[in-house]
Image (cartoon, rainbow, N blue to C red):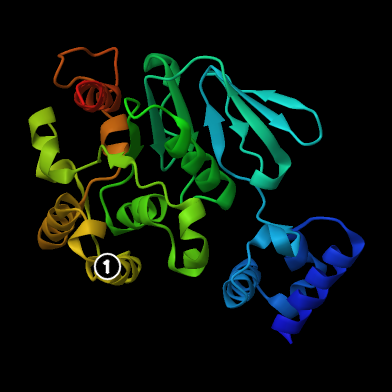
């Protein structure tokens, strides 16, 4: 009944010539669908079965990813123009609503962050994407577009929590998701380089093991789910599972401590000895300098 309910609403959207969202479908019949996750799964399964993009079904996810940074204009099919800025994030529009991009200033680098953690005004000429957890399709499409069109000298960097959940998010960006594997060529941005957070590197920044977040009995069930996700990732060949990811995951599971981004945002004085700049910004600057130097030397 749930599948038929989704198919009926998709048929209405196609016949009526309008676009609907997964959220709209759910609220059309909350009693039938029970949860938003049910609708999400059915829509993705139907698209995968027919090897169709969701846009071909006139269905899209509600936008949640944010775009920050100067130098990017997004021209929409509605003829509106969205200009990015460094101080306030704008919602990333779905790919079918975008006519073209204009880059007025080529960024020095691109930064994707798992969560809203820092202001990019401290970070130079950058375009930033905030995925807010697992990224929506619009965010992944935009990142893929950057990867396909920006000069090879521009590194695309990702900052995620150093735990199974963060690594799984990183994997979705870089290699694509299992639920949308039929669209991997459109969505996987394999140019991405991870900047961490890596638990093994934090001692150099003055962050000891005791400051990392313990995996407790209270959240053990959640961590087991994350661990199972990570195990599935580890089944991939080395070309799709960097050795750094493997070693960091093994270390975390052995120590039962995880390195979330907040470990660095809660502290100020670190490797530079400065108390006016968060340790996270100091950490990012060191990583960014490394990758920018690496890519400009290629």
Residue 273 horizontal/vertical position (percent) = 15, 14
Residue 181 horizontal/vertical position (percent) = 47, 66
The C terminus lies in which quarter of the figure? top left
The residue positioned 27% from the left and 26% from the top of the image is 284
Please name whichever residue, 7 or 283, is drawn nearer the observer in this view of the structure.
Answer: 7
- 140 left or right of 262 in image: right
The residue positioned 52% from the left and 61% from the top of the image is 183
Which residue appears farthest toward the bottom when viewing the image? Answer: 1
- 227 left or right of 37 in image: left
Total tally of numbered discs in the picture:
1
- 256 left or right of 176 in image: left
The residue positioned 52% from the left and 26% from the top of the image is 68
**Residue 37 in which image quadrant:** bottom right
Figure check: 163 above or below 2: above
Figure check: 289 above or below 158: above
Please name whichever residue, 184 or 4, is drawn nearer the observer in this view of the structure.
Answer: 184
Figure check: 80 above or below 49: above
Please name whichever residue, 266 or 16, is drawn nearer the observer in this view of the structure.
Answer: 16
Residue 221 horizontal/vertical position (percent) = 33, 71
Q: Is label 1 in a helix, a strand or a loop?
A: helix
Residue 134 visible in the picture: no
Mark 1 surroundings within 10 Å by alpha-carbon count, few (fewer than 14), some (14 through 19), many (20 or more): some
| Residue located beneath label 1 in the image | 227
């Amino acid at each position: 009944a749930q599948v038929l309910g989704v198919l009926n609403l998709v048929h209405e959207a196609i016949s009526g010539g309008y676009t609907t969202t997964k959220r709209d479908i759910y609220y059309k019949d909350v009693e039938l669908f029970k949860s938003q996750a049910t609708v999400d799964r059915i829509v993705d399964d139907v698209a995968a079965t027919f090897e169709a993009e969701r846009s071909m079904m006139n269905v899209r996810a509600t936008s949640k990813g944010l775009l920050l940074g100067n130098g990017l204009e997004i021209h929409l099919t509605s003829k509106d123009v969205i200009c990015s800025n460094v101080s306030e994030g704008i919602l990333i529009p779905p790919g079918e609503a975008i006519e073209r991009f204009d880059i007025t200033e080529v960024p020095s680098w691109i930064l994707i962050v798992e969560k809203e953690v820092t202001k990019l005004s401290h970070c130079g000429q950058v375009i930033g994407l905030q995925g807010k957890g697992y990224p929506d399709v619009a965010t992944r499409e935009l990142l893929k577009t950057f990867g396909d069109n920006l000069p090879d000298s521009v590194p695309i960097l990702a900052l995620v929590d150093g735990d199974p959940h963060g690594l799984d998010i990183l994997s979705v960006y870089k290699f694509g998701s299992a639920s949308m594997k039929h669209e991997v060529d459109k969505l996987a941005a394999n140019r991405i380089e991870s900047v961490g957070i890596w638990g093994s590197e934090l001692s150099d920044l003055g962050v000891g093991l005791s400051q990392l977040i313990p995996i407790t009995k209270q959240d053990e069930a959640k961590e087991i789910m994350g661990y199972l996700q990570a195990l599935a990732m580890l089944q991939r060949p080395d070309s799709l599972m960097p050795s750094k990811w493997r070693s960091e995951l093994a270390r975390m599971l052995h120590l039962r401590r995880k390195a979330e981004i907040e470990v660095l945002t809660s502290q100020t004085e670190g490797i530079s000895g400065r108390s006016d700049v968060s340790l996270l910004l100091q950490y990012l600057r060191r990583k960014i300098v490394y990758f920018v130097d690496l890519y400009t030397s290629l």
